[in-house]
Image: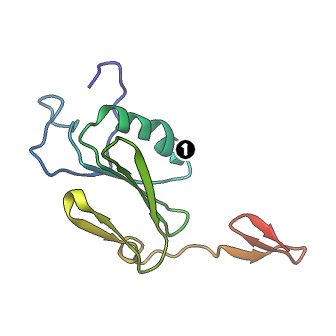
Amino acid sequence: MPDDQRVVLLPRCGICDKRQYHDQHRDVLLNPKIIIDVLSPSTEAFDRGEKFRRYRTYIDSLTDYVLVSQAMALVERYRRQPNTEWVLSAVSELEGDLHLASIDCSLRRAEVYDRVTFPAETHENPDGEYVVRGVTCR
């Protein structure tokens, strides 16, 4: 890890190989296969942008970057391809699941959001128009 790079603490990650740490404090993991971030309004832009760029650049072992939305029932996964491109897939169906082949595990959307209630995504405004996820429909 370059000395001039800021460390980003990983909320959740998966490892298949022997853990490799930055130093004897064992608080900076160098070889996660999967990182799971729960998005919040205050950090979502950073998580999707600069933080993900750092992960792609400095963590060669990373195969999957999973983003879990707090605003809606949506789980997104960026998966590294053999040509080093990253491909996005998303699960928004209630019974949908996301298979993480590198650790042979599936995330079921229904389990991720078990006991979570979201505010209605559609409402009627004072002019009698419907608003769906912030977009006004006539």
Q: Which residue lies at the image location 75% right of the left edge and 65% below the top edge?
A: 135
Mark 1: which secondary structure?
helix
Name the image quarter holding the N terminus.
top left
Q: Quadrant of residue 133?
A: bottom right
Can you give x and y, in whole percent of width and height, for residue 49 in the image? 50, 40
Q: Give coordinates of residue 128: x percent, y percent.
A: 88, 78
> How far across and down, in percent of the image, does residue 10 sit?
31, 45
Q: Residues within 10 Å of mark 1 (few under 14, many from 20)?
A: few
Question: In the figure, is residue 42 to the left or right of 86?
Answer: right
Residue at 26%, 37% in the rendered image = 60
Q: Residue 4 is drawn in which quadrant?
A: top left
Residue occupying the point 36% across, 32% down: 57
* Drawn side of residue 121 relative to residue 128, left or right: left
Give the residue at the far bottom of this rendering.
95
Q: Residue furthest front?
A: 83
Q: Image height check: is 36 above or below 134? A: above
Q: Which residue is mark 1?
A: 45
Whether 5 is drawn above or below 28: the answer is above
Numbered label tally = 1
Q: Is 125 positioned to the left or the right of 25 in the image?
A: right
Give the percent coordinates (x, y) of residue 40. Answer: 51, 53
**What amino acid is at disc 1?**
Ala
